[in-house]
Image (cartoon, helix red, strand yellow):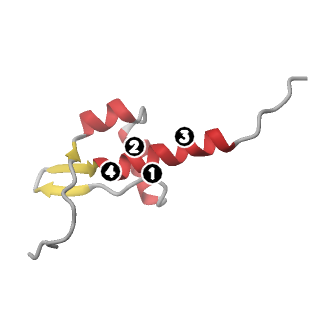
Amino acid sequence: MAIAKNSSPSRIISWAQLRTMVPYTRQHILRLENAGKFPRRVRVGDNRIGWLLAEIEDWIAVRASARDDRQPTTGG
């Protein structure tokens, strides 16, 4: 297996760590992944998966940006 020499190292986070950042169930995360709406998991070993922290942080940032871009509505 070749590893790219110029790629910057990225931290892989566990399900427990992901859960503290994104309050979704495992099933919902899987549905979002399958729909292409959430970063894909990385197989770390035979019985271990994780997510790239940078991708999760980017996913969160996009949602925060979309929230900030919305125009305020006037109460009625």
Q: Which residue is located at x 22 percent, y 41 percent?
A: 14
Per the image, label 3 sits on a secondary structure element best described as helix
Q: Residue at x 10, y 56 (%)?
A: 46
Amino acid type at image mark 3: Ala
Between disc 4 and disc 1, the foreground one is: 4
**Which numbered disc flags the more N-terminal residue, 3 or 2?**
2
Write down the residue under mark 2: 27
Residue in view at x 29 percent, y 47 percent: 53
Callout count: 4
Check disc 1 and report the residue beneath it. 31
Amino acid found under the numbered disc labelled 2: Gln
- 53 relative position to 63: left or right: left
Q: Is residue 33 left or right of residue 64?
A: left
Contact between marks 2 and 4 (CB within 8 A): the answer is no
Q: Earlier in the sequence, mark 2 or mark 4?
A: 2
Quarter of the image where the C terminus is located: top right
Question: What numbered label is drawn on residue 64?
Answer: 3
Front-most of 35 and 19?
19
Q: Amino acid at mark 4?
A: Ala
CA gap, disc 3 to disc 2? 23 Å
